[in-house]
Amino acid sequence: MPFHVEGLVAIVVFYLAILAVGIWAAWKTKNTGSEGDRSEAIIVGGRDIGLLVGGFTMTATWVGGGYINGTAEAVYVPGYGLAWAQAPIGYSLSLVLGGLFFAKPMRSKGYVTMLDPFQQIYGKRMGGLLFIPALMGEMFWAAAIFSALGATISVIIDININISVIVSALIATMYTLVGGLYSVAYTDVVQLFCIFLGLWISVPFAMSHPAVTDIGFTAVHQVHQAPWLGSINSLDIYTWLDNFLLLTLGGIPWQAYFQRVLSSSSATYAQVLSFLAAFGCLVMALPAILIGAIGASTAWNQTEYGVPDPMTKKEADMILPIVLQYLCPVYISFFGLGAVSAAVMSSADSSILSASSMFARNIYQLSFRQNASDREIVWVMRITVFLFGASATAMALLASSVYGLWYLSSDLVYIIIFPQLLCVLFIKGTNTYGAIAGYLFGLVLRITGGEPYLYLQPLIYYPGCYPDENNIYIQRFPFKTLAMLTSFFTNIIVSYIAKYLFESGTLPPKLDFLDAVVARYSREHMDKATLVKSDNIVLNELAPVNPRHSLTLTSTFTNKEAFNYVDSSPELSNTEDN
């Protein structure tokens, strides 16, 4: 394949434009927030992200390289088809559920990161444990999409994969490093526009190629392969449901989502943003679905791609860039390449910022350096943005099973963090003992279920499991959802048992080594008197506390908007008994 100078120039121009927008947004954020809350301005954008920018950035976070490439692949693969392209509906429902049930309580209480309520209720150690699956999910996701971007660029302009990955990662890391959420949000606006324009421009040209059969006919008739609408085998119904619930419910407890929620100017805006993003995800999936259908309707022996087809060559995951390359004119394929690059960067920068935000605030500041200055926190964030960006890049270049690692870590987000989030926001009386027990039970059940992408054999063989071509057993039973429910109910049951044993005197107070039940004034728990500003809330609205006046937190769990929704007593009552 010849080296395309025009394609390289198009990519360079696109990257420079994105970098310019990111630097402009970084300059804008310097004028936002007072001297004492600069770190919070970087993490949540000064809590003044409006509906337009907020809707774009929340949509762009989900509509990444994995989203559009994966949707096109699912539609293209024979035997799967549109019936198995679960991401558009799954993520859209996830955003709707997040807006209905999670956005308002999180935003109205003025949290800064997703881990704040865990540290407030369960203590800093539990917050550190929950940081592990959250970090793994963000890092492996960024690495997976960087890897996909490198392969995509190499298909279209024949440039070295490593160079394309490194340059893309440097651009995304650079503007995230200097501007935080403002840079990420404003570049997301540009990137989402590029995705929409680039893919929709490509679709008519690809559809009109002589080698492409009418996709309406191939949707229900077998021509070059099985119909692209697909079907769900009766044996695979439980697997389909398990994966769908993982996308729908497991798509909620991500810092990338709550970062947008918490940056909204009000709790109501946070809900509206979620609904707008849900609609945006559906709209942005349409061109990817059509490209997958076009790939399934193409006689590849009549194109320059030749034989065998992409499925036989095991290049089904690259069907989107292959369609752009071989079924579109050269100048059109470059527009599509810009769209894919935009999609990748819009997700990668969000993941990097999310990971650094949680580390700087919940690990460094609230666990180890509660007296750290705001300037110190800002520098910790900048350093970790660079380190996490470099780590994701290294994994994309070196790890052969980065997708398998991401699948496993995203499962852990669903199985561990989601039930913990339900408990901490909506279930009264849960404590650290239940949280740790639920964490461990969920982790054990997931690991023992095996992971084909990592060639990890299961230790528990659920009904219906069968070996694949590599003799790795595949589970048909919805064991991921079983692990999530087990984690959820274990948290509740163990919490109430521990509470009963200590409060009834069956166990002496000295055995409450986590200070979760008897020791109401524990040093382990984040002191609620210092987590709010005195002019925001009367302390008797919270559980009894023992204030430590010697502690000063320049950045607290609440901002000026905290507890504006005083009339929403169900939201406040969740913290009263914890």
Image (tube, rainbow, N blue to C red):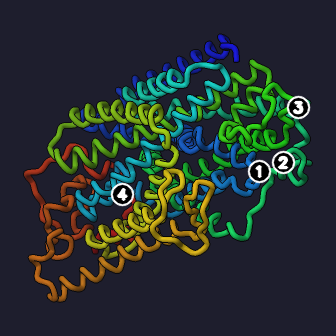
Mark 2 or 4: in front is 2
Q: Which residue is under mark 4?
A: 109
Q: Which residue is under mark 1?
A: 78
Q: Is residue 117 left or right of residue 506?
A: right
Q: Amino acid at mark 2?
A: Gln
Q: Is residue 478 left or right of residue 425?
A: right
**SS of the residue under disc 4:** loop
Q: Earlier in the sequence, mark 3 or mark 1?
A: 1
Q: Earlier in the sequence, mark 3 or mark 2?
A: 3
Q: Amino acid at mark 1?
A: Pro
The span from disc 3 to disc 2 (Cα, nearest Å) is 19 Å
Local crowd size for mark 4, using a 10 Å CA cut-off: few (<14), some (14–19), many (≥20)? many
Mark 4 or 1: in front is 1
Residue at (53, 32) in percent of width and height: 345
Q: Quadrant of residue 9?
A: top right
Q: Amino acid at mark 4?
A: Lys
Residue 567 visible, this angle: no
